[in-house]
Image (spheres, helix red, strand yellow):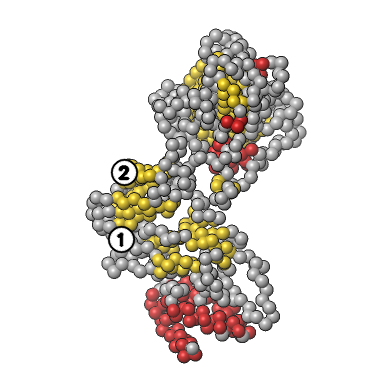
């Protein structure tokens, strides 16, 4: 990007941005630019500099905001870094007024046998380069580096963190002016007994209100700086010492703003006085992890350093989920990796949205209910609008552990839309699902939602209102894996109010599933049922082989077990269930008794059952959608039911 002004580069992911022979290349190179923005960008792969602003041409008034970079490998033995502001030499056009806000360099690959400057670098003549809320975590070389250049001045780091990053910050011999580090946290920087005191931290620059943990460096005790122990820290980006060290919890700079625009430098002092937009969870972190985890091996034949690259290191190690000791599954994300990097304590964060928001209407009020995911919230904010394309406005703020709210004093015959979010002192969650209801209108929920007696399918009962038009158009079943607290929800929509059972064929053997259900139509959703589960789909071979003289089980799909379901001889009686509308009907129970007590006890009976289960599911589905056919089948089945009753 060259000789541009007033440009915005946003939401870009780059892997292997340059060819291996491009010794001095970078994934993004920007020279001769003014008033340009680089925002929500993530870079990994082959590079000398991941993103490089400056070098040989005037670069002024640029912003790097929420850039995430991971250095992998390159050909050059020259100094290299992941994020660089590169000045010229004496007499060349300036590189000045550059802001780096909430940028991260993470999990750098080891560059053995060559100079690795590290995370952030400012070589040569620069002025007014300011980094706010930036993090260098688990990198070789230096966390933050500035060349010994007496022509550079007024370059600062504020509320920045260097943790497990080699030699921390090396700034020395800068020109007069305000240069240095303020409210930064340095951990384990600088080799013991280093002959160059500046290599551990900062030298011949200002250093105020910083925290040094196990460091060997100059200026550690001057100007209000303090030394500390690792044990004092719970989270690397939240200093436990009031007024000292870095705390990085809020976004710095209003999203999308260029240098000088309104809000471009909000929170540049690291306080919460000017704005209050949460930084965490990190934007687009799922995309970042997906890109960084992809295979990114150095090609052979170019003399690359290093010669190998494990992309599943650092925050990319492990799977997408893990469980705490309480058995609750949580997502393994960039946010969680940084917050839990040192102590391993559970992140004090609520960012998965409340789920299952439902609305039930009366004449002039609507009752809301929902499910909370974590129990770390301070409360819930409820928003409402009256038009599907309208703007939401907050109408209420309820306390922690509250999972319902009555919205009263509403207009008659009006549809209202709702969503909610949870919050605490640090974070706000994503929004819940949107729900709606029309006043003066009641949609009854399904009842008796459970597994069928033989555990082969889900079933329920539905009793619509007697008022015309108040019936459901169908049902929505929600399924989660592993735990009811999982934020990953699969919705199964059944557009048939007469179908009162469901056989889930989209499951994987050996995984626990949970289900819940609600009715819906074009005017409203009903409230949800309670969760049913866990339900575990059995693979072939999970069941024991029957003894030679024992009846063989019928063919059934899926074969399921549940910790809260009853037993049974085999799969469901699909045709009878379709005819009578529910597997709990007394007539269906009679057919199950015939199957279990008579047919299963003979070879010919078992053969008939096998044939029946092989073809009955599509027939039952066809019957269930046609009320006239259901009535005919019921009439045809009555003689069998009567005969079975006589046998008893």
Viewer can see residue 96:
no
Determine whether, in the image, residue 548 is placed left or right of residue 124.
Answer: right
Disc 2 packing (10 Å; few <14; some 14–19; many ≥20)? few
Residue on which disc 1 sits? 442
Residue on which disc 2 sits? 395
Location of residue 269 with respect to 440 vertically, above or below: above
Residue in the picture at 38% in, 75% down = 627
Location of residue 547 with respect to 119 vertically, above or below: below
Q: How far from the left and from the top, in percent, is residue 496?
A: 41, 66
State which tag comes first along the sequence, 2 or 1: 2
Viewer can see residue 162:
yes
Residue in the picture at 51% in, 62% down = 533
| Badge 2 element | strand
Residue in the picture at 46% in, 90% down = 646
Label 2, label 1: how far apart the Cα atoms are: 22 Å
Q: How far from the left and from the top, in percent, is residue 602?
A: 61, 85
């Amino acid at each position: 990007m060259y000789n541009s002004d007033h440009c915005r580069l946003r939401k870009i992911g780059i892997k292997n941005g340059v060819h291996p022979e491009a010794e001095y290349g970078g994934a993004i190179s920007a020279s001769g630019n003014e008033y340009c923005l680089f925002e929500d960008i993530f870079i990994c792969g082959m590079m000398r500099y991941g993103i490089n602003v400056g070098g040989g041409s005037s670069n002024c008034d640029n912003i790097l905001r929420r850039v995430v970079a991971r250095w992998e490998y390159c050909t050059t033995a020259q100094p290299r870094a992941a994020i660089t502001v590169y000045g010229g030499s004496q007499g060349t056009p300036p590189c000045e007024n550059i802001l780096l806000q909430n940028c991260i360099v993470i999990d750098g690959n080891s560059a053995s046998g060559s100079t690795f400057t590290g995370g952030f670098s400012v070589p040569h003549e620069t002025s007014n380069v300011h980094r706010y809320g930036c993090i260098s975590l688990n990198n070789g070389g230096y966390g933050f580096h500035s060349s010994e250049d007496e022509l550079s001045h007024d370059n600062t780091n504020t509320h920045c963190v260097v943790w497990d990053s080699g030699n921390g910050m090396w700034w020395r011999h800068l020109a007069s002016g305000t240069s240095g580090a303020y409210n930064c946290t340095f951990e384990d920087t600088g080799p013991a007994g280093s002959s160059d005191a500046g290599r551990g931290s900062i030298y011949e620059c200002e250093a105020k209100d910083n925290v040094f943990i196990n460091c060997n460096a100059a200026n550690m005790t001057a100007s209000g700086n303090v030394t500390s122990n690792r044990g004092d820290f719970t989270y690397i980006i939240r200093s436990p010492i009031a007024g000292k060290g870095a705390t990085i919890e809020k976004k710095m700079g209003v999203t999308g703003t260029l240098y000088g625009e309104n809000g471009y430098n909000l929170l540049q002092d690291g306080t919460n006085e000017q704005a209050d937009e949460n930084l965490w969870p990190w934007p687009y972190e799922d995309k970042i992890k997906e890109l960084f985890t992809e295979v990114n091996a150095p090609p052979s034949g170019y003399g690359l350093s290093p010669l190998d690259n494990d992309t599943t290191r650092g925050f990319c190690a492990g799977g997408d989920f893990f469980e705490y000791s309480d058995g609750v599954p949580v997502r393994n994300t960039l946010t969680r990796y940084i917050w839990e990097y040192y102590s391993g304590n559970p992140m004090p964060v609520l960012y998965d949205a409340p789920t299952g928001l439902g609305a039930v209407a009366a004449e002039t009020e609507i009752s809301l209910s929902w499910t909370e995911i974590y129990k770390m919230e301070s409360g819930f904010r409820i928003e409402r609008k009256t038009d599907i394309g309208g703007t939401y406005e907050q109408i209420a703020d309820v306390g922690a552990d509250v999972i319902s709210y009555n919205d009263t004093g509403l207009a008659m015959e009006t549809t209202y839309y709702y969503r909610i979010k949870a919050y605490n002192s640090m974070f706000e969650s994503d929004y819940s699902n949107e729900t709606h209801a029309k006043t003066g209108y009641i949609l009854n929920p399904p009842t008796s939602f459970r597994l069928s007696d033989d555990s082969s399918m889900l079933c329920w009962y539905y009793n619509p209102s007697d008022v015309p038009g108040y019936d459901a158009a169908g049902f929505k079943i929600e399924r989660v894996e592993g735990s009811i607290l999982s934020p990953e929800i699969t919705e199964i929509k059944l557009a048939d109010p007469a179908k009162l059972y469901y056989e889930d064929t989209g499951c994987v053997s050996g995984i626990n599933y949970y289900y819940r259900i609600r009715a819906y139509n074009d005017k409203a959703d009903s409230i949800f049922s309670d969760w049913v589960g866990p339900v575990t789909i059995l693979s072939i071979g999970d069941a024991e082989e029957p003894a030679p003289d024992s009846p063989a089980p019928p063919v059934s799909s899926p074969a399921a077990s549940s910790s809260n379901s009853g037993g049974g001889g085999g799969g469901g009686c699909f045709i009878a269930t379709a005819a009578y509308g529910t597997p709990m009907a007394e007539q269906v129970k009679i057919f199950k008794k015939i199957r279990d007590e008579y047919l299963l006890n003979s070879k010919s009976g078992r053969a008939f059952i096998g044939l029946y289960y092989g073809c009955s599911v599509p027939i039952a589905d066809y019957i269930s959608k046609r009320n006239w056919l259901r009535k005919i089948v019921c009439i045809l089945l009555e003689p069998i039911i009567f005969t079975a009753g006589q046998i008893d």
